[in-house]
Amino acid sequence: MESIIQSSIEKASALLINGEVIAIPTETVYGLAASIDFPQAINYIFELKGRPRTNPLIVHVATFEQAEKLCMSFPEPLKKLANQFWPGSLTVVIPKSELVSDQITAGKSTVGIRIPNHPELLKLLEQTGPIAAPSANPFERISPTTAKHVADYFPKGLKMVLDGGACQAGIESTIVGFENNQVTVYRLGAISIEAIEKIVGEVAFFDSEKSHFVTPGMSKKHYAPKTKTIVTENIEDFVSKHSTSKIGIIVFEKSSGTTVSKEVILSPSGSLHEAAQRIYLTLHEFDQLDLDCIVIEPLPNQGLGRSINDRLSRAVHG
Ligand code: TXA
Ligand code: MG
C-alpha cells in the first residue's frame, strides 16, 4: 500500500481545497489541518484527535494581511511581537472577525493566529488560504515532530501527511494575548519569555485558576508518553533504588554516569534550542523501547529550558 507520507505540496493543497483533513509540517510540531471554510473538516479534526469541543484551534496564515482579515483588532504590543517573530513560533490571541467560525474558536470571541516558519507550509498556505490546525497528536499525547510520528498515531483516517522533515523548533508555539492592558502568556513555548520581554517589557502569566475557561494546553496532564515518566535532579539515587528496572534516562548536557538500558544527552554543547528540538523526538523514541520508566533531568529554568520544564511537568502528572 502506498504510504500516506508524501511530499507533494500540490496534492496537499488540492486535498485541503476539497475540504479534506491532512497533516502538515510546521517548524514547531506537526498539525492536523483543514481549511477554515469547511465546517465538516474542522469537525473531523476534533473527532480524530478526541479533542473536547471546548478547546479552540489556532489558525495558520501566510501573510500579515491575511492575519488582519481574521481579526477585529490587533493590539499594538501584539503587533510588535508578531512583527518581530513572524514567520515563527508565536501565536497571538486576538478578537476574531466573522471569517473565523465559533466552531474553530470553541465559542470564544478571540482567535489564535500565527504565520509559521516552514518553507513548504508557507507555499501551501499561499495556495489554500487560512488553515486551522492543532498539534497532530491524540488528546493528551506528545506532539509529533516527524511525519512518521503522525502516521504512527493515525494509521487510519488521514489521506496524507505532508512530509516536511523533522521539526526545527521541536516544541509548540508560545501563545500570548492582551488582557488588562498587558501582554499575557497563555502557554510557554518555542519563543522564550526573555525574547518577548525584550520587545514589550514585563509580561503577565495567565492564571487558569482564576478563569472560567480552561485552556487544555495548560491542563496539568498533557504531552504524556505511555511509559511512566519521572523528572528528578537525583538520577543516580533513583537508578540505585531501582536496579532491576529497565530505565531510559534523558539528561541535558552531561551523562548521568549510571549504567542503564538507554541514555540520551539532549545537547552535549549545552544548547537549550537543541534540547527543545530533541525532547519530543527522544520521548517518542523511548516510548517504543518497552522501558519500565523514563527518568528525566530538569533543564536550567531559563529561556527555552523553562518551556521544556513546563512540558515535562505535564508529562509526569498523574
Ligand atoms: O506550535 C503550535 O502552536 C502547533 C502547530 C501545529 O502550529 N499547534 C498547536 O495547537 O499546538 P494546539 O491546538 O495543540 O494548541 C493550541 C492551544 C490550545 O491549548 C488552545 O486551547 C489554545 O492554543 N488556544 C487556541 N485558541 C485560543 C484562544 N482563542 N484563546 C485561548 N487559547 C487558545
Ligand atoms: Mg496540542
Image (spheres, helix red, strand yellow):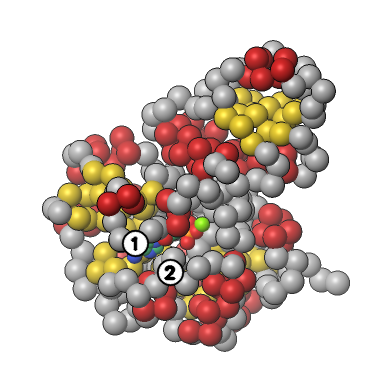
User: Under 8 Å from ligand 1: the CB of mark 1?
Assistant: yes
Query: Which quadrant of the view contains residue 152?
Result: bottom right
- What residue is at 49 percent from the left and 31 percent from the top? 272
| Residue 49 lies in quadrant | bottom right
Tell me, yes or no, whether the two marked residues, 1 and 2, touch with CB atoms within 8 Å.
Answer: yes
As shown in the figure, which amino acid type bears the numbered disc 2? Thr
List x then y, in percent, for residue 151. Answer: 71, 62
Local crowd size for mark 2, using a 10 Å CA cut-off: few (<14), some (14–19), many (≥20): some
Q: What quarter of the picture does the N terminus occupy?
A: bottom right
Residue 98 seen anywhere in this rendered image of the structure:
yes
Q: Secondary structure at mark 2?
A: loop
- Where is residue 278? Give x, y as percent: 60, 38
Q: How far apart are the two marked residues, 1 and 2, measured between alpha carbons?
A: 9 Å
- How many numbered tags mark residues here? 2
Disc 1 target residue: 213
Q: Which residue is mark 2?
A: 54
Q: From this viewpoint, which residue is outermost toward the right?
A: 1
Position of the C terminus by quadrant? top right
Residue visible at 68% across and 73% down? 158
Q: Residues within 10 Å of mark 1 (few under 14, many from 20)?
A: few
